[in-house]
Amino acid sequence: MRQLKSPSPGEAGGGEGWGPNERSEAGVFPPVRHSPWTCRAAPPPSPNSLPPQAGGEGFKVWAGVALLLLLAVPAAASEAPRLYTEHCAACHGGDRLGAIGPALLPENLGRLKKTEAERVIAEGRAATQMPGHKDKLDPQQIKALAEYVYTPLPAVPSWGMAEIEASRVAHVDPSTLPAKPQWQADPLNLFTVVETGDHHVTILDGDSFKPLVRFPSRFALHGGAKYSPDGRFVYFASRDGWVSKYDLYSLQMVAEVRVGVNTRNVAVSHDGRLLMAGNMLPHSLVLLDAADLRPLQVIPVTDKDKTMSSRVSAVYTAPTRGSFVAALKDIKEIWEIPYGKGAGPNFNGWVHSHEFGEGVGEPAVRTTTEDYLDDFFFDATYERVMGASRDGRKGLVYDLDIKRKVAEIDLPGMPHLGSGIIFSREGRQYMATPHLKEAVVSIIDMATWKTVKRIETLGPGFFMRSHENTPFAWIDVSMGKDKDAIQVIDLRALEIVRTLRPAPGRTTAHAEFDRSGRHVLISVMEAEGELIVFDAASFAEVARMPMKRPVGKYNVFNKINYSSGTSH
């Protein structure tokens, strides 16, 4: 394990984005050297030029040139591996799994369009050590490189205990951390704001709406930051496999470890002892010690017969059950992994004796499902879990105790269950969920698991939020043409009572309440975006703060108390 000095708050300790974003042994980037490749292909013909008359000498010359030009693209494509080795491997790894720069795989670059990737290869990325290559490579070579990094690997890469342990970085000795916050603010009313526009994180005071610090993050963080039970530490997972632990009291990075090549998210045990990370590549779950991110176990995700493996869609904490729950993309199962101190082996089949004399124990309890379930929503007891069917038309409810389906809900339009909320109305509990492919919010009675109302909205939406101290829920409709609208639902009347357009023409989404429920923060998810604060009762604007594509913000108190109005 390497011991590295952590950069001070606000210090540019490393690049962000497409290029290198990791620190070297000295805490800074090493110099990057690039080969003097200067080959150029013939320029393409003018788009306005026309072929000469067929049959003449001019036509024969033109046809020959045209054939050569047609062959130029395949030629550039065929030399892409060599171009990658010469210009990219030093930073991104010869196997494209990442080195001092992020992994360059289609799974890791899913949100970056190929045209944007070509632009980054040509021009580089500002404020990082990703240089431009347009002076070394012609347009066809740049295009070929972009195509190459979007090509899947021929086999699932290996990333086991040895690789994970070797990657672990300790930035500070945990014993040297202060006992109290080194700043004046309510530590439970902080927001962690993930800004993917330039790969930074802002820690925001939820009372003054002033930043305490802004620091560079790993490449392409997933939005969902997770907290330790006391709210002191915040954990991040990046798309290219890095899990980071950050101390909010002293505003510094504590430790980092790379748990995979492509990671979906991380969950924190309710007692704060453990972390579980779910990987898309390789197909595994990784258990970490929350204190220092030391890897404890790598769990291959396979079916009962070990004949098929699966990507992990997400990992959740079930605090009342003392377990992690995993959603799987490629196997029709729900996995529950108990983590209590007395948790023993789990048997998903016949055993010979109570003393486990025969049979093989495994870390997960399997619940077989009738469809692939990617997106989970839990009831308040965490005994029942709802998953969205792959066809996007229904929700399937499974009881984790009896391991059977107990309800099926008609939910056309691809419900986004992971963003659902729970609320009480007239003595009953309901859940509400937006839909990704239909302009509607569905209201479901959690006693009968029946849809009681579908509230029409201006368009499909992604996020929905509420709070125990407000009668309103805030939704976005960012998946449709009215992407700049935020709509407010009165949960007593089950109807929309207000439509806000705080940033006309700009994508506006992801509401999050402060600790008290008095204020709501909204993201303008643009490269030059902002956070907008509203009074939760009057809907009046309170403040604005510039941000670089703030895709998510997470209140400490609401998260560690498992607020019914937010996701977990």
Image (cartoon, rainbow, N blue to C red):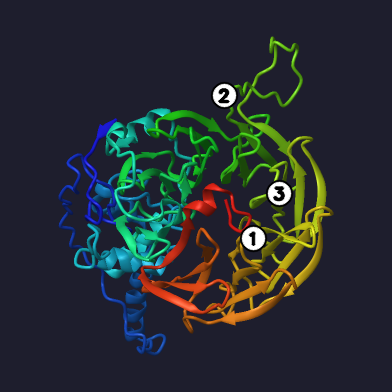
Disc on res. 416: 1
In percent of width and height, residue 458 lies at: 64, 79
In percent of width and height, residue 429 lies at: 76, 56
Q: CA distance from mark 2 to mark 3?
A: 25 Å
The reply to whether residue 140 is visible in this rendering is no
Disc on res. 84: none
Tell me the SS state at disc 3: loop
Q: Residue at x 32, y 58 (%)?
A: 212
In percent of width and height, residue 99 lies at: 30, 44
Q: In the rendered image of this protein, does residue 350 appear above or below residue 368?
A: above
Q: Quadrant of residue 26?
A: top left
* Nearer to the camera, 336 or 322: 322
Q: In the rendered image of this protein, does residue 276 appear above or below residue 467?
A: above
Q: In the rendered image of this protein, does residue 200 appear above or below residue 323?
A: below
Q: Can you identify the residue that label 2 sits on?
A: 341
Query: In the picture provided, is 115 more to the left or to the right than 414?
Result: left
* Nearer to the camera, 491 or 399: 491
Q: Residue at x 72, y 27 (%)?
A: 348
Q: Can you identify the residue that label 3 sits on?
A: 379
Q: Quadrant of the N terminus?
A: top left
